[in-house]
Image: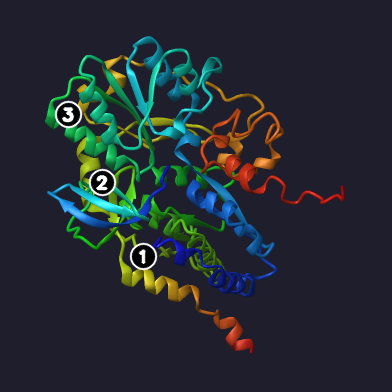
């Protein structure tokens, strides 16, 4: 496919890999965080870490919406589906996230809850129109990429005057999470960020500028194809070597400094900042998520069904929190690949294909294992 | 979650609706989040919405960047 195949070319990858090897100073360790799960997935799937010199270490960030969603939020959706008998729609990634009482949305469905997977918010709206006698709730998750489609559908629901459609909003903000990571204990050792691809198509490159100017951390926005990631790593190595910290954009084919103004305006019309939101692993972060504006209150499922959020601790053995903060690697979790697998996930990072644990399990769990003759 | 794929606009139906071609599969998408999209443009499609147009000149420039052998080698050879 155009704009995909050419950005996966193995011969070009060798050139970029050789450039990185040549320019990465052997006396320096480069600790680079790829914020997005999409980048984590590309690094694992294409074996990019094997193309990097040992001095360049990629640390996986929290940019996976399913991974950072705390158990208490999933509980809200499960309760709605089981107790209020609504039709609960969400994106497929959410269904298998373990929640309280050994439940997940999928297991709630097995108990008779009406849980549906949708590809698009438009499908959720259509379902509401097709079932006028039922309340339909869309469980909305995602970073800035996924927020504009939720805003668009809320505008449409308002225009149509739909009375049986509402949304549980779990949309979160990338820059707030980056601030939290830099302010945390692991922030100091980071040398730079591979910045988001599709989030940046919406918000532009400008919101990352404080990370360079205030924290002195270079940011290079990169596409999700393997060559994009490799080139961004090279650009970060160059900035570190030169002692520079600026925002650079490798993904110029889709990202501008200003981003998508039309999408931003729509999001701003429908949503406002929440005072605080709990993230798995990062804790409660002020001004890090969105909620519906008062003008859209009738579409806010948290108000309509008087939902009360309760914080629930993660499974004791699960290291998702430390992994999401970049403090631990998936293999350092003692239940990784044994008790916790994609078929039977204990923590959220094993659920979504963008989760660091799922990516390692799928593409790298045998790496480094000694080969023994049969 | 942020998965999105580049697709070619095959047909524009009214203000906010289009048909794209995703490697041979025709799919209806929304143009509610983008402006000035015409047939032949490539857009990034995410959960049924075009998020942004792709700039072909910039893509070619980036591809050329990948092929650039770093200056360090030039100076040492």
In this rendering, the label closer to the viewer, 2 or 1: 2
Q: Residue at x 31, y 54 (%)?
A: B21
Q: Is residue A74 left or right of residue A258?
A: right
Q: Residue at x 52, y 67 (%)?
A: A9
- A57 versus A363 height, above or below: below
For marks 1 and 3, the one nearer the N-term is: 1
Crowding near the residue tagged with mark 2, few <14, some 14–19, many ≥20 C-alpha atoms within 10 Å: many
Would residue A211 be visible to someone looking at this image? Answer: yes
Mark 3 sits on what residue?
A295
Regarding mark 1 in the picture, which secondary structure is present there?
loop
Q: Is residue A297 left or right of residue B75?
A: left
Mark 2 sits on what residue?
B29
Between A127 and B75, the residue placed more toward the observer is A127
Mark 1 sits on what residue?
A252
Q: Chain of mark 1?
A: A
Q: Measured from the top left, where is residue A218 in percent x and y? A: 48, 61
Residue at the extreme top of the image, as rendered = A83
Q: Chain of mark 2?
A: B
Q: Chain of mark 3?
A: A
């Amino acid at each position: 496919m155009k704009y995909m195949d050419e950005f996966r070319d193995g011969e070009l990858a060798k050139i970029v890999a050789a450039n990185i090897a040549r320019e990465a100073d052997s006396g320096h360790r480069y600790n680079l965080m790829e914020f997005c799960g999409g980048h984590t997935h590309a690094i694992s799937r294409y074996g990019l870490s094997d193309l990097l010199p040992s001095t360049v270490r990629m640390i996986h960030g929290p940019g996976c919406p399913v991974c950072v969603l705390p158990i208490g939020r999933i509980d809200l959706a499960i309760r709605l589906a089981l107790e209020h008998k609504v039709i609960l729609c969400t994106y497929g990634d959410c269904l298998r996230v373990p929640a309280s009482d050994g439940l997940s949305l999928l297991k709630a469905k097995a108990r008779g809850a009406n849980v549906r997977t949708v590809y698009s918010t438009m499908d959720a709206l259509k379902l509401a129109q097709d079932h006028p006698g039922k309340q339909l709730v869309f469980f909305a998750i995602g970073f800035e990429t996924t927020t504009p489609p939720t805003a668009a559908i809320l505008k449409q629901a308002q225009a149509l005057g739909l009375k049986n459609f509402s949304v549980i909003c779990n949309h979160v903000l990338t820059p707030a999470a980056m601030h939290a990571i830099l302010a945390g204990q692991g922030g100091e050792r980071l040398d730079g960020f591979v910045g988001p691809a599709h989030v940046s198509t919406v918000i532009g490159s400008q919101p990352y500028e404080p990370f360079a100017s205030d924290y002195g951390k270079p940011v290079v926005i990169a596409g999700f194809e393997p060559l994009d990631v490799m080139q961004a790593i090279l650009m970060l190595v160059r900035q570190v070597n030169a002692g520079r910290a600026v925002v650079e954009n490798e993904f110029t084919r889709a990202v501008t400094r200003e981003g998508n103004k039309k999408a931003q305006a729509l999001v701003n019309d429908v949503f406002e900042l929440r005072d605080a939101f709990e993230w798995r692993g990062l804790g409660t972060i002020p001004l890090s998520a969105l909620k519906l504006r008062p003008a859209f209150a009738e579409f806010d499922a948290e108000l309509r069904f008087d939902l009360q959020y309760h914080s629930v601790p993660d499974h004791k053995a699960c290291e998702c929190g430390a992994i999401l903060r970049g403090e631990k690697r998936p293999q350092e979790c003692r239940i990784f690949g044994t008790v916790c697998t994609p078929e039977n996930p204990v923590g959220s990072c094993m659920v979504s294909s963008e989760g660091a644990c799922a990516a390692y399990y799928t593409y790298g769990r045998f790496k480094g294992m000694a080969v023994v003759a049969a | 979650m942020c998965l999105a794929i580049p697709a070619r606009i095959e047909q524009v139906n009214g203000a906010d609706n289009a048909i794209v071609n995703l490697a041979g599969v025709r799919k209806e998408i929304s143009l509610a989040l983008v402006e000035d999209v015409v047939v032949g443009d490539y857009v990034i499609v995410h959960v049924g919405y075009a998020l942004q147009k792709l700039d072909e000149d910039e893509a070619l420039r980036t591809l050329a960047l990948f092929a650039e052998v770093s200056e360090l080698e030039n100076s040492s050879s």
